[in-house]
Amino acid sequence: MNAASPKITIRGLRKAFGRKVVLDGIDLDLGSGESVVVIGGSGSGKSVLLKCILGLMEPDAGSILIDGVESVGLRGEPRDEIGRKFGMLFQGAALFDSLPVWENVTFGLLAQQKIRRHDARGIAVAKLAQVGLGADVCDLVPSELSGGMQKRVALARAIAADPEIIFFDEPTTGLDPIMADVINSLIVKTTREVGASALSITHDMASARKIAHRIAMLYQGAIIWAGPVADVDASGDPRVDQFIHGRAEGPIQMAVRA
Amino acid sequence: MNTLQLVGAFALSFFAVVGRLTLFGVEALSHCLRPPFYLRSIGRQLIDIGYYSLPVVGLTAIFTGMVLALQSYVGFARFSAEGAIANVVVVSITRELGPVLAGLMVAGRIGAAMAAEIGTMRVTEQLDALTTLSTNPMKYLVAPRLIAGVIVLPLLVIIANIIGIFGGFIVAVYKLGFNPANYLQNTFEALHVDDVVSGLVKAAVFGFIISLMGCYHGYTSRGGAQGVGQATTSAVVSASILILCFDYVLTELFFAK
């Protein structure tokens, strides 16, 4: 990890929808080769944070530096150039229904014209092997795959272009505990093989503990604690304690209607 | 809320939608004109919109032509003007009924399918996935559909015109007892290039409208299955209304003295 030259530097990031402030001055760094996991409850703004970094949403204020280049407000080719450094694993896999698995995996490479179409299948087979899938799934369409297999294909797609930074949005949501651990192991293995930095968001603490070097907790639009994964149990913040132990009682009150 | 506020709120929301649709259309058009062009995607859309719409457009056209001949006969027989039936069938089909009915049928079949497909991609984050894979969804999804719509609707209308006129011929000859050679001669005499071309121009405009409405409502859909359902309904309704509006506008442009 090279803390001196972070891959992502976020300062004072703010995003509101109407009067609801979702991100209220976020500061966060992601070092080279580092894996940072942002934890937080549902609706805490984790997905909005990720979308702002990916350029899918425009923040109201603040700065997002990618390798030292300001990405907020960037358009056209400069934005695409930054986007080519990214890989993304979506919560619901977001595979393209109409395309077979091999085309899904190599979609980004074909779109960027890094490879020719007749070479794509071989590359897809190699990437699928990295996530533990055989060549026999190449010609299946996503609807013929189980949830766990879809996540693996989506992971293969995320790493296909050897990105410098990979984002994981709730990578284990909807999976059984064993498959969730398989996906976590694959995330650790593949990011290491690709040599990428990783920024994940999750509320699954087992996942966070397995894939993170550092954990940051998002609550009410702000990072309330950040530190090495080994220190999360001794954070000294009752809100972090309540969240990581999954207690209903504590300073974080959920809006529950009887 | 008083009446004035209601009218104001309606006007504001109407112009907001018109503004958003215009911006969407202009951006989509700009992607139609700038490379890269997704030829495979355009080809797939040509088949989806054109080839698979042939049965429904053909059936609509043949029955329309048949009914037209029958109704014209009933009306014209009162004035002993049965000989004008071929003329009425040809002019009605080529100028109006061919493009409008084909447009409405394709709007129902394809507009809804486009909105449902793109809307589902929106709510399942597939559009976001495209963006993260360095692919502009407007260029990859919307532009090929617009290009295919503009190309294929005139081709469908040519076929609809032929089938519709043939439907009139069948009824005139086999039910109403017209002489086939005379009916065909009258048909070819009534067939004018201007009428056919105006119908094809209308068809191209309708193809653009159908694709634009399907893509716009799918692209801007929100809120899961319900949002996608609303998008499909809005796509069909708005495309159908716009087809009828533009039919009048284009007719006024082509034929008003």
Image (tube, coloured by chain):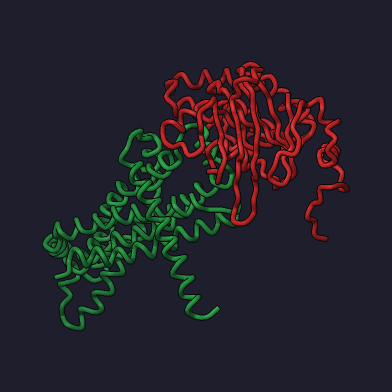
Chain colours: A red, B green
Q: Quadrant of the N terminus of chain B?
A: bottom right
Q: Which residue does the image show at 64% across and 18% down from the upper left?
A: A2
Q: Which residue does the image show at 59% across and 21% down from the upper left?
A: A5
Q: How many marks?
A: 0
Q: Nearer the viewer, residue B3 or A117?
A: B3
On screen, residue A89 versus residue B190, left or right, reads right
Percent of width and height locating residue A42:
72, 46
- Residue A202 shows in this picture: yes
Percent of width and height locating residue B179:
16, 66
Q: Which residue does the image show at 28% across and 69% down from the upper left?
A: B68
Using the image, determine if residue A175 lies above or below residue B203: above
Q: Nearer the viewer, residue B60 or A163?
A: A163
Using the image, determine if residue A234 lies above or below residue A32: below
On screen, residue A232 versus residue A145, left or right, reads right
Q: In the rendered image, which quarter is residue A132 located in? A: top right
Q: In the rendered image, which quarter is residue A164 located in? A: top right
Q: Nearer the viewer, residue A36 or B210?
A: A36
Percent of width and height locating residue A158:
58, 28
